Amino acid sequence: MNHSRKELCPLRNTSRLKPNDIIVASCPKTGTTWLKALTFAIVTRGVFDNSTNPLLKKVPHECVPFLELDLAKVSSDRDSGIPLVATHVPYISLPKTILDSGCKIVYVCRDPKDVFVSLWYFVAKQLISKNIEPIPKEDAFELFCKGTAHCGPYWDHVNEEIPKFLRQEISTVHGYPFSLEEEEKGVMQKVTNICSFENLSNLEVNKNGRHRENTTLAIPNHVYFRNGQAGD
């Protein structure tokens, strides 16, 4: 299902971003959870260590809220001290106020075949848990190729209009490059370790917790951690 004008209106109301803000942008099932964890760990590495990092107690989606899902309804959900927000809205559909804000945008892309497979399993798992028969994979694939997908056509997310500056090293785009001293102390490896699939997927909060509990958007955290392989 594509984004409608009605859905994008709240996004315009949350677009008071600043030049030091960072948007984690992605098409669903391209690595959003991992990218959120990685950006959060990089940006907050001077505030938290691997024993106090909120990622140990919260799903990455709670640490980096979505503009159109979380902040459009409850703006107080954002920690003012952490300049991170996220969106599944394609770059070419973002409001001009956001693009003109000077904020940084970090974008993650993935092979479309892998995106489709991951998306199908993600949706199917949720439907089955509600005793609803998921759409056959062949039919879903046809819809995906036609661009009938949640958050818009996949192709809008990899449009050639996306500026080249979005394809730089994550820490550099953030404005949080690692120093030589940090490299020597193994800070980069610590960030990598806490954000690894093995670590995140085995945390208690991600095995048994629920995101947006007590809302119509509530979802078990474990569904965000399917151990997919490229080309599966």
Image (cartoon, rainbow, N blue to C red):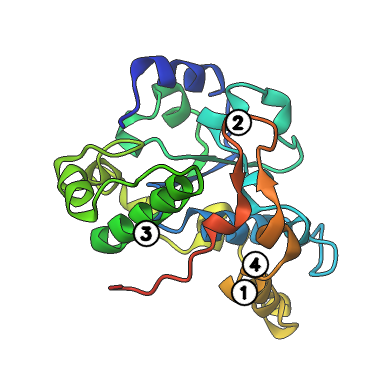
Disc 1 or disc 3, which is closer to the eye? Answer: 3
Q: Quick one: quadrant of the N terminus? A: top left
In the picture as drawn, the residue positioned furthest to the bottom comes out as: 184
Give the left or right position of residue 55, taking residue 52 as reference: left
Three-letter residue code for mark 1: Thr
In primary-sequence order, the first of circles 1 and 3 is 3
- Give the label, 4 or 3, closer to the camera: 3
Considering depth in this image, is 214 or 32 the residue closer to the camera?
Answer: 214
CB within 8 Å, label 4 to label 1: no
Task: Between label 2 and label 1, give the one nearer the viewer.
Answer: 2
The residue tagged 1 is 192
At a point 35% along the width and 16% down the height, the residue shown is 5
**Badge 4 or badge 1: first in the primary sequence:** 1
Count residues near mark 2 (Cα–Cα under 10 Å), then give few for <14, some for 14-19, many for 20+: some
- Nearer the N terminus, badge 2 or badge 1? 2
For label 1, count other residues whose C-alpha is less than 10 Å away and answer few (under 14), some (14-19) or many (20+).
some
Gap in Å between the C-alphas at discs 1 and 3? 23 Å
Disc assigned to residue 70: 2
Q: Classify residue 145 as left or right of residue 221.
A: left
The image position of residue 15, as x and y in percent, is: 53, 24
CA gap between label 4 and label 1 equals 11 Å
Q: Which residue is mark 4?
A: 200
Amino acid at pointer 4: Leu
> Relative to 228, does residue 55 appear above or below in the rendering?
above
Q: How many marks?
A: 4
Dot 2 or dot 3: first in sequence order is 2
Q: Residues within 10 Å of mark 4 (few under 14, many from 20)?
A: many
Q: Are marks 2 and 3 in contact (CB under 8 Å)?
A: no
Residue located beneath label 3 in the image: 118
Left-right relation of 59 to 168: right
